[in-house]
Image (tube, rainbow, N blue to C red):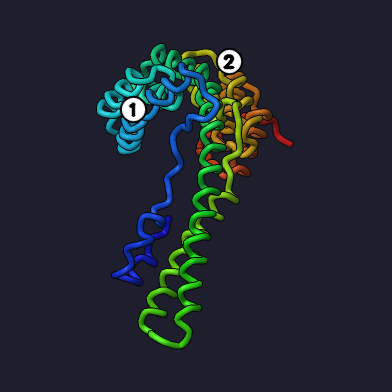
Amino acid sequence: MKQNALGMVAGVSLIVLALNLPALPLFGQKDFNVDEKKLIDAFKRANPFYLGGAELFASGKLDKAEKKLLECLKTMPGHADASYLLAQVHLKRKELPQALEAITTAEKNYAANARLQNFSHQDYLDRLRQQRQGLETQRSQIEQKIQALGGSNNAEKGRLEQEVQLFVQSIREIDRRLNSPVAATFEIPADYRYIHGNILFQMGAPLDAAARYREAIRLDPRHGNAYNNLALVAFSQRKYREALDYLLQAEAAGAKVNPEFKNAIESRLPPQ
């Protein structure tokens, strides 16, 4: 939540706790059985390792990233995103069998992870609504105090009006979150399919890779990199017209296209 309004009133202490809106909980415990609650607890313990691994991976520190991700998976073997990221670590190192095992594990576990998150999000929205109601009640109480002061004690009236504005800001932030719900989905993400395709392509299975790229495009029709790699597959099969069509779709989707690759395709096409 934006906290810039807190600097307005140094002396406001009664509503600071109310302004600390909760972050999205990793998993709620609504309608879960005992085994699922254990998974929730495992996720809460494992996810900091995943987040650390993701940050290290983005910085190119593959060895340190792998260590964090393995710690995450030791704590929660079914952490799909950790397996997905670990697949990319192995892919960058050209450790293809390990990469394939990791992405396959990620895809297998994704639906179960998504189901937990779906329950969690509904629980999160319920608690946001409850908090909003509490903030509205407190704002109303302060407004009643302002009315009771009338024209007297302008300093106290000004302080209370600033408190009301802080409550208004908090309520608006809750409304923003309530109006931006996360859509529940149990389909494997397009990027999972894309990375799976990259692994298969490098393992010498272009047709299997192409199937994964097409699945990525079905899930995300603007996945330019998947179109680009379909062009590579088509080129490797000497299907140059098809390769150019895919490359043009990659460009339309905003993907960076190697101009030398494009020239190589065009040079192999028959003259119009």
Residue sitting nearer the eye, 188 or 97: 188
Mark 1: amino acid: Arg
Q: Can residue 267 be seen from the camera position used here? A: no
Q: Nearer the viewer, residue 155 or 37?
A: 155
Task: Where is residue 195? Give x, y as percent.
Answer: 49, 25
User: Which one is nearer the viewer's eye here, 206 or 74?
Assistant: 74
In the image, which disc is placed on residue 222? none
Q: Which residue is mark 2?
A: 208
Above or below: residue 101 compared with residue 264: above
Expressed as whole percent of the image width and height from the top left, the position of residue 135 reads: 49, 58
Q: Quadrant of residue 7?
A: bottom left
Which residue is situated farthest in the bottom direction here?
Answer: 151
Distance CA(mark 2)–CA(mark 1): 36 Å
Displayed quadrant of residue 40 = top left
Residue toward you, 139 or 174: 139
Measuring from the top left, give residue 115's x and y in whole percent.
Answer: 55, 26
User: Quarter of the image containing the C terminus?
Assistant: top right
Question: Callout 1: helix, strand or loop?
Answer: helix
Q: How many marks can you see?
A: 2
Q: Residue at x 44, y 34 (%)?
A: 26
Relative vertical location of residue 238 with respect to residue 13 in this rendering, above or below: above
Furthest-front residue in view?
148
- The N terminus is located in which quarter? bottom left
The label nearer to you, 2 versus 1, is: 1
Residue at 45% of width from left, 23% of height from top? 37
Question: Which residue does the image show at 48% across and 66% down from the upper left?
Answer: 141
Q: Which mark is residue 45?
A: 1
Residue at the (69%, 30%) spot, across then down: 270
